[in-house]
Image (cartoon, rainbow, N blue to C red):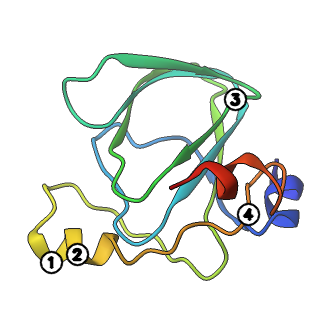
Amino acid sequence: MERIFSANGWPPQWRNGVYSFHHYHSTAHEVLGFAAGHADLVLGGEGNAPLTVHAGDVLVLPTGTGHCRISASDDFLVIGAYPENEHWDICRTAASPETLASMRKVRFPHSDPLTGPSGALPRLWI
């Protein structure tokens, strides 16, 4: 995953898990590559139904997408990557009007993290 993400303009920045608290990133889009194990995650904020991810799955989270780990196997491992020149933050509270305005300025990815510039993400993301 690290090699593929890097080759497609999404350089990996960490290996770990997913935080057990609800959070989002206001300054970057994120790709999560699940390298080992499995976990139940909540996407989109508190109150949403859990989603189970397994080794080999990949999620692309647009800036502002809440996420949280509910449970995970002992071997759960995630590769986190972001488009080139994007720097992530961690937000745990509702976005202010200023934060929302800033998130609207985060550029659309020019490349799909798995298939590159001609992949689905830059063609379908509108």
Cα–Cα gap, marks 1 and 4: 27 Å
Q: Earlier in the sequence, mark 4 or mark 2?
A: 2
Q: Look at mark 1 in the image and give the residue it sits on.
A: 98
Dots 2 and 1: beta carbons under 8 Å? yes
Residue 52: horizontal and vertical position, in percent? 52, 17
> How far is disc 4 from disc 3 in space, using C-alphas?
18 Å
Residues under numbered marks 4 and 2 in contact, where contact means CB atoms less than 8 Å apart: no
- Mark 2–mark 3 Cα distance, whole angstroms, equals 31 Å
Q: Which residue is mark 3?
A: 57
Seen in the image, is 78 located left or right of residue 102? right
Distance between the alpha carbons at the discs numbered 1 and 3: 33 Å
Mark 2, residue position: 101
Could you tell me which secondary element the residue under label 3 belongs to? Answer: loop
Taking the spot 60% from the left edge, 47% from the top edge, the residue there is 16
- Residue type highlighted by circle 1: Glu
| Numbered disc 2: secondary structure | helix
Of the residues shown, which amino acid type is indicated by label 2? Ala
Q: Which residue is mark 4?
A: 111
Viewer-nearest residue: 108 or 32: 108
User: Answer yes or no: do the residues labelled 4 and 3 have beta carbons within 8 Å?
Assistant: no
